[in-house]
Image: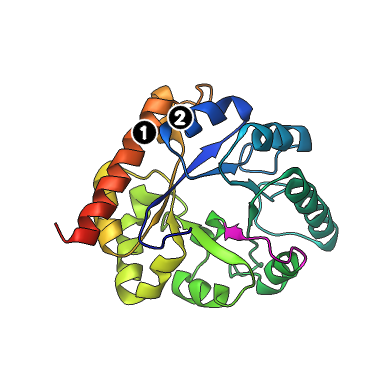
Amino acid sequence: MGDASAGLLEVAVLHARDVPGCLAGGADRLSLSVDGRSPDVPTAAAVIRVSDVPVRVTLRLDASYTTNGGDLMRMIGLAREYVALGAEGVSFGFLDADLDIDVETTRALAESLPGVPWTFHRAIDATLDPLRSWGRLSGLPGLTTVASGGSPQGLTQGYDDLLALLDRVPSVARVLMVAGGLRADQVPWLVRAGVRQFQVDEQVRPTGSERAYVDAGLVRSWRLLLDDVVSRRATGS
């Protein structure tokens, strides 16, 4: 984010046909994945080509949050291809067998992409000790964003826990991007807690279906809401 006082709206996309609605609606950044995993290179190329806002591409090869050496090398190769195509950054994160942050593997991937900003994705919501996990992320090179809904079930279950975390460790707000079923009525409270990055997904698809393309009007409604809430907070009104 450029201006730390502004709100950043990220929209999750699946393919290039989602991009026009994001751009027309005022999205600041796109997050690309397919079924929560890495897209193929042609899909990534198509999205990046038609987007004039930053795109972060997911690095994840299967349904788990663990990886091995071979998978890590494959993801490093994919990441370099995405960046060469014009991706602004990537999104990834690894856990160990004890459901703790796999700092060694995460750092290895981050260090293989010098100068590339990245998001630690919602793997953090699957850890057993979120407070410890946030601490283990501090200092990782290139990390600008941590996506979280406070629970593996998203904000439906994790909203109160996320607010409690923000109250206990206010510095979390600097990198937190709230994701996972965000509701409009939650935005003012999260902004009040210092959060400035928000992700929407099914909220901007008619009927909430992945079969529907991202709708510009729905994106615009979130854009206006976020801008209004952040502006009010900045002026104390």
Q: Is residue 52 left or right of residue 26?
A: right
Q: Secondary structure at mark 1?
A: helix
Q: Position of residue 138 (x, y in %)?
A: 54, 76
Q: Please report the bounds of the magenta region as a residue range.
A: 112-120
**Residue 115 painted magenta:** yes
Tell which of 150 and 189 is nearer to you.
189
Q: Is residue 4 left or right of residue 80?
A: left
- Mark 2 vs mark 1: which is more N-terminal? 2
Disc 2 crowd, CA 10 A, few/some/many (<14, 14-19, 20+):
few
Disc 1 crowd, CA 10 A, few/some/many (<14, 14-19, 20+):
some
| Residue corresponding to mark 2 | 24
Give the residue displayed 56% in from the left and 58% down from the top: 123
In the image, residue 18 sits, relative to residue 138, either above or below, namely above
Are dots 2 and 1 in contact, CB under 8 Å? yes
Image quadrant in which you'd find residue 43: top right
**Amino acid tagged 2:** Ala
Q: Would you say the magenta stretch is mainly helix, strand or loop?
A: loop
Q: CA distance from mark 2 to mark 1?
A: 8 Å
Give the residue displayed 31% in from the left and 47% down from the top: 227
Tell which of 3 and 212 is nearer to you.
3
Per the rendering, the mark at residue 220 is 1
Q: Position of residue 10 (x, y in %)?
A: 48, 45
Q: Position of residue 32 (x, y in %)?
A: 61, 41
Q: Is residue 196 left or right of residue 185?
A: right
- Residue placed farthest to the left in the image? 237
In the image, residue 162 sits, relative to residue 138, either above or below, namely above
Q: Position of residue 230 (x, y in %)?
A: 28, 54
In the image, residue 137 sits, relative to residue 162, either above or below, namely below
Image quadrant in which you'd find residue 5: bottom left
Q: Is residue 33 left or right of residue 3?
A: right
Q: Secondary structure at mark 2?
A: helix
Give the residue displayed 61% in from the left and 59% down from the top: 118
